[in-house]
Amino acid sequence: MLPALSASRPLRLTFVTAMYVAQGVQYGLLIIAIPAYLAAQGASPVAIGGFISAAVLPWTLKLLYAPLMERYTVLAMGRRRPWVLVGTLGAAAGYVAMTLVPDPLANLGLLTGVMVGGSLFLALQDIATDALTIDVVPLDEQPFANGLMWGGKVFGIAGTSAGGAWLLGAVGLLGTLLAAAVVTLAFMALPLVVRERPGERLLPWTAGAASPEARALQLDGWRAIGRSLRRVVFLPASLLVAAAGFALLLHQGLFDAYGPVFVVQHLGWTDAAFSNAKALGTLVGGLVGMIGGGWLVRWLGRARAVRAALLVLVAVAVAMALAAPLWSTALVTEAYLLLWVTAQTLATIAFFATCMALCWRPVAGVQFSLYMAIGNVGLVTGSALMGPLVGALTPSQMFAAMAVVPVATAVLLLRVDVAAHVDRLAALDASPLPPTSPLPMGQGEGGSTAAIPRPPLTPALFPRGVETGSARTRHGH
């Protein structure tokens, strides 16, 4: 028997990385490889754009169904693992369902609708994986986990973009979708054979029981979830990080929208040259984040690591604003793209680690999804602002404007005291909570609706002296 995730560092890091690679496989196939294939088959730009938008849509709506994961689970199998299994299995089934669409190129609308169903499941797996990381990965280990997860997703995207394009040309759409289903099922093998905590069931019909810690964390009813969420999201650090996440992703939205406009339209590059340069930056950024992201956060602390990466973004934008005479040199633009993507990747990894440290485990899935949803609003806002800004500013002024947003983000993070927030979470752990659930979804263990004594939730997550951001913890939690 394999050890439980809570008891094995290598196993839990492998687990969360593998789940993010699976997400990268879907992104690389549905957002990159299949749209390119559709274009080669003569599909209209409107149809291709609709396919991509539909593929992204479930990831922007995670906040709407994250509460379902908090409310319902097969607790004897763990708080999050059942949802990881459901999400991964549903994603594989989605690929199979897409193969049943007759003449998919002629029925692209139906193919797109079926694809959305599979994407909904994998977005659910994403929520469950993030919440599981908060639940079972110790606080001082979470930055390394975030680096591995982000790197795994990047390499999943890159590998599937290339491999999917080859498969589409070799075996067609049907064979590629079946291959994607098999690969996704292969990723399901790991959550099938490991437990979240010792003593839990592997499957509903196997031996085991809900762990005391999982039972103490599980809330009973929508009202309890809502009340518990309000207790944590209005803490000062939560509000500041939500605002910082909006600004951080707003900056990325500006870059994503302005990058091709500047490089292709203003400098005269081909779209392929721009895509290749950005792809190289993404791979390098993913590798640097995978290897050095956790180390950077551990060395500087969470909030300081985000600010350090933001300062690099500011420096890169200012340098581009001042280097107009050198823009015609391809190496300058390539260096800009490489440095920007790498710095943004490190900032994102450190920011995600900060968000995880702020999450209260009874409602971690909804709370983390809330931070991500606010960030997505910033991403959309940044893309929308690009048009008016380009019409009003010169390219040099545009880069100067893009330098302002990371400065604002860094100023917000100056007031984030992760250590003080950790103390507040410990106080919430000790305070009365609504009664816990009598083992959701009918597990037949005779649970009672009476409140279960809460074990000390904090010691395993916050060891003495762990760097948590703006200061080291002042107590041995």
Image (tube, rainbow, N blue to C red):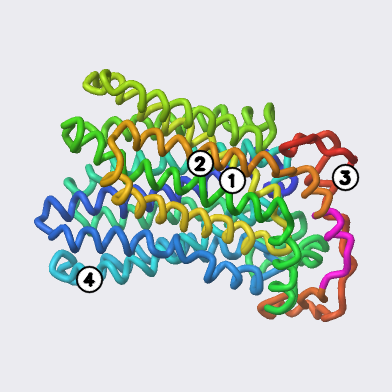
Q: Which of the labelled discs sits on residue 150, or is there none?
A: 2
Residue 45's disc number:
none
Q: Residue at x 79, y 62 (%)?
A: 211
Label 4, residues with CA under 10 Å away: few <14, some 14-19, many ≥20: some
Q: Is residue 288 left or right of residue 161?
A: right
Q: Position of residue 39 (x, y in %)?
A: 15, 53
Find the magenta span and give its range. 425-433
Q: Which residue is mark 1?
A: 352
Q: Earlier in the sequence, mark 2 or mark 4?
A: 4
Going from N to C along the chain, the mark reached first, 1 or 3, is 1
Q: How far apart are the alpha carbons under marks 2 and 1?
A: 10 Å
Task: Look at label 1 and name its amino acid.
Answer: Phe
Overall secondary structure of the magenta section:
helix
Residue at image location 78% in from the left, 43% down from the top: 419
Q: Position of residue 172 (x, y in %)?
A: 18, 53
User: What amino acid type is highlighted by mark number 3?
Assistant: His
Give SS at disc 3: loop
Residue 442 higher or lower than 146, as above or below: below
C-alpha gap between disc 3 and disc 4: 54 Å
Viewer-side label of 4, 1: 1
